[in-house]
Image (cartoon, rainbow, N blue to C red):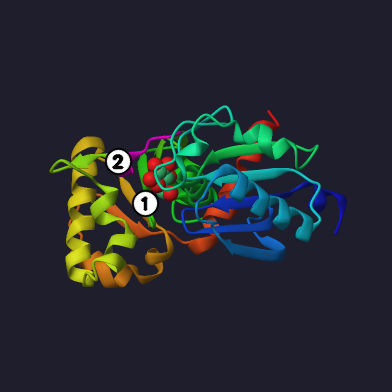
Amino acid sequence: MNETDSDSLVLGIDIGGTGIKASTVNINSSKLTGKHLKVPTPQPSTPEAILSGINKILSELNWKGPIGSGFPGVIKKGRVFTAANLSKEWIGINIENEFKEFTSNKVAIINDADAAGLAEMKFGAGAEYYRHKGGVVLMVTLGTGIGSALFVDGHLVHNTEFGHIEIDGIDAEKRAATVHKEREDLSWKEWGARVNKYLRTMENLLSPDVFIVGGGVSESSERFFPFINVNAKIVPAQMGNDAGIVGAALAIENQFN
Ligand code: BGC
């Protein structure tokens, strides 16, 4: 590995409602390098439990370099403002400062869907829009919750939280997140209709040029895209489950400015 390669290595961590994933990422190529670790999110998902899990991952990887992490809530200047699918004890914690206990190197914390969006825009389904710096791109991640990442002319509008738009008086993610397909044993058609209603609502509000649909379920897009009827172009995410890790690592680039 030459010097430039090692300078581009960042540990990307994706903290999710059900799992925590980590890998070193070459932020110039988006490639994961070395060991890829995945552990279940501790329950209850308190800051102590999750931070100690991350500490273990870091010792296992023996990582001392920069760290970028995605977190499933609103993050401003490293501080957690919301945590819909994790312990509420997270609210108010400066997660960036907590991570600084683990490394003397750079740390960047970003909303998990924003992270996935950055990865897709730079290296995946949104690359064309990123290159031209034109248009409105809305990435939605379907998983334990619904995450959103909005790009306007190539710029990320952080912390949009469109998974919590109310539709018929109900928080959208409580109906259309993937977890509800599983919990309520919905067919692809039934669940697809919910996703359709969600995307049509977003389309009425934002008129995006393209929707990028991410989350693990995007690998089965052919099963539910037939039930989606929107005017915008709709594409599945291309980076699969790695998008969250790669995008979290990319967040470090802002820290170098
Ligand atoms: C959270 C978002 C997060 C999304 C996906 C939502 O419940 O409020 O911040 O991006 O879940 O994890």
User: How many marks on residues?
Assistant: 2
Looking at the image, residue 80 sits to the left or right of residue 5; the answer is: left
In terms of depth relative to the viewer, which is nearer, 117 or 131?
A: 117
**Ligand 1 image-quadrant field:** top left
In terms of depth relative to the viewer, which is nearer, 169 or 12?
A: 169
Q: Please tell me which residue is depicted at 81% across the width and 51% down the height of the picture.
A: 6
Q: Please tell me which residue is depicted at 53% across the width and 53% down the height of the picture.
A: 244
SS for dot 2? helix
Residue 159 is one of the magenta-drawn residues: yes
- Residue 32 x, y percent position in the rendering: 66, 61
Majority SS type along the magenta span: loop
Q: Quadrant of the N terminus?
A: bottom right
Does ligand 1 reach within 8 Å of label 2's beta carbon?
yes
* 10 Å crowding of disc 2: few (<14), some (14-19), many (20+): some
Q: Please tell me which residue is depicted at 57% across the width and 27% down the height of the picture.
A: 77
Q: Mark 1 and mark 2 in contact (Cβ < 8 Å)?
A: no
Q: Which of the 4 image quadrants contains residue 69? A: top right
- Residue 168 x, y percent position in the rendering: 13, 43
Residue 102 is one of the magenta-drawn residues: no
Q: Quadrant of the C terminus?
A: top right
Does ligand 1 reach within 8 Å of label 1's beta carbon?
yes
- Residue 116 x, y percent position in the rendering: 49, 50
Disc 2 and disc 1: Cα gap in Å? 9 Å
Q: Which residues are magenta?
A: 158-163
Residue identifier under label 2: 164
Q: Amino acid at mark 2?
A: His
